[in-house]
Amino acid sequence: MNISMTVNMVKRSFDVQPDEVLLDVLRCEGYLEVKGSCRTGDCGACTVLLDGRPVASCLTLAAKADGHAVTTVRGIGDQAHPHALQDAFVRNGAIQCGYCVPGAITSAKALLDENPDPTEEEVRLAMDSNYCRCSGYEQQVEAVLDAAAHLRKGDAK
Ligand code: FES
Ligand code: FES
């Protein structure tokens, strides 16, 4: 079946199987920033935004994204134009092996879009489905709070 979706602001069409999940379609199409790990919806590595809301792409049928907007961490910001969250993750030492980071930043982006001034507890709650096997949780929470502060001050994008 053929589906169309906007990926990182670019309209794309994909030929997919009815039972194919979004994670596999995205990775096959070169969006390698979307990571797969548990494939059971538990670890958060594969998180992308579907119409602005975080979803586990390993459990989301690609067909469900037909007609919708998908954002990966690369659509949030890239090396040339990093988002405040990406800057803050680097500044706060919140990246160790880096495997969980695309999903963690994507969940954090959804949080800050909805709540620009979260408490530490709200950050922890928003990211409680993003496992970090390097156990860099403290630094990640600090990075999200740091990015939120910069975004509120208006000195970051
Ligand atoms: S790979 Fe999707 S939640 Fe772990
Ligand atoms: S930085 Fe290694 S899994 Fe999180």
Image (cartoon, rainbow, N blue to C red):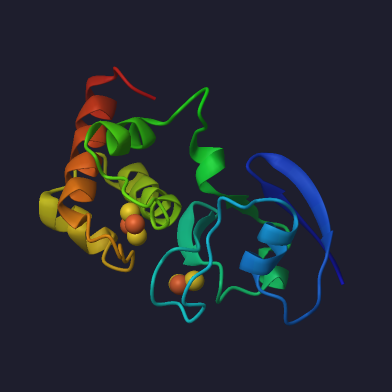
| Residue nearest the observer in this picture, 96 or 128 | 96
Tell me how many marks there are. 0
Would you place residue 33 above or below residue 133 in this image? above
Horizontal side of residue 56 vs 85, given as left or right: right
Query: Residue at coordinates 50% horizontally, 45% vertically from top-left?
Result: 73
Query: Residue at coordinates 53% horizontally, 67% vertically from top-left?
Result: 36
Measured as percent of width and height from the top left, residue 104 is found at: 36, 54
Would you place residue 47 above or below residue 115 in this image? below
Extreme residue in the top direction = 155
State the quadrant of the N terminus.
bottom right
Would you place residue 41 above or below residue 94 in this image? below
Query: Residue at coordinates 26% horizontally, 34% vertically from top-left?
Result: 147
Measured as percent of width and height from the top left, residue 116 is found at: 26, 39
Q: Ligand 2: which quarter?
A: bottom left
Horizontal side of residue 137 vs 12, given as left or right: left
Extreme residue in the left direction = 120
Quarter assignment of residue 144:
top left
Query: Residue at coordinates 44% horizontally, 63% vertically from top-left?
Result: 45
Horizontal side of residue 156 vs 5, given as left or right: left
Measured as percent of width and height from the top left, residue 3 is found at: 81, 63
Quarter assignment of residue 89:
top left
State the quadrant of the C terminus.
top left
Measured as percent of width and height from the top left, residue 42 is found at: 39, 77
